[in-house]
Image: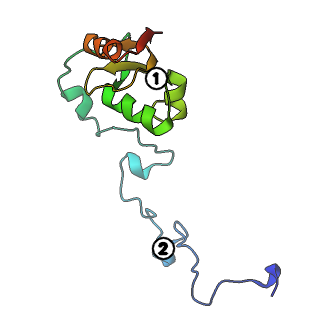
Amino acid sequence: MELNNLKPAAGSTKSGKRIARGQGSGRGGTSTRGHKGAKSRSGYKSKRNFEGGQMPLQMRLPKRGFNSPNRVEYVALNLEHLQALSEKHNLTEITPTALYDAGIVKKNDRIKILGNGELTSGLTITAHAASASAKEAIEKAGGSLTLA
């Protein structure tokens, strides 16, 4: 057996239905497009969300609120999460690059430390923001916090 001898199993393939090849084919005349209207014409292309001239849904619905283009979004990390991370990876210094290497944050994420949980060891933490309770808990445990 060679590549030039291969062919599909008998009965497994069919030729496609040929439309617009005369009335005798059963698919002549309007060629399965129906009568009149944009869809029956050549060159028809539907626009996304077009509702046939009816007012589109996204224009009918009321608009509310405001999305600030200057919003700064942080990845929130609790103290208990940092403690577990330091024990698992044997870390004393937690930085954005260390968190990225551990697969917790993405490359350009901004990190905010929150005060839920407690630290048992003094960690040197570098983050972009921190809550007052987190800052207090870190210093109480004998660690330090640097805001980058």
Tell me which label, 2 or 1, sits earlier in the chain.
Answer: 2
Which x, y percent locates residue 116?
25, 25
Residues tagged 2 and 1 counted as in contact (Cβ below 8 A): no
Say which of 95 and 34 sits in front. Answer: 95
Residues 114 and 119: in front is: 119
Nearest the viewer among 138 and 113 is 138
The image shows residue 35 at horizontal and vertical percentages of 35, 56
* Residue corresponding to mark 2: 23
The residue indicated by pointer 1 is: 109
**In the rendered image, is residue 108 in sight?**
no
Nearer to us of marks 2 and 1 is: 1
Q: Position of residue 110 (x, y in %)?
A: 43, 19
The answer to whether residue 62 is above or below residue 9 is: above
121 and 95: which is toward the camera: 121
85 lies left or right of 120: right
Q: Measuring 66% from the left and 83% from the top, which residue is drawn there? A: 8
Residue at the spot 34% in from the left edge and 12% down from the top edge: 139
Q: CA distance from mark 2 to mark 1?
A: 64 Å
The residue type indicated by label 2 comes to: Gln
Who's the residue at 29% across and 11% down the image?
136
Say the numbered circle drawn on residue 37. Answer: none
Instruction: Label 2, secondary structure: give it.
Output: helix
- At label 1, the amino acid type is Asp
Relative vertical location of residue 59 with respect to residue 145 in this rendering, above or below: below
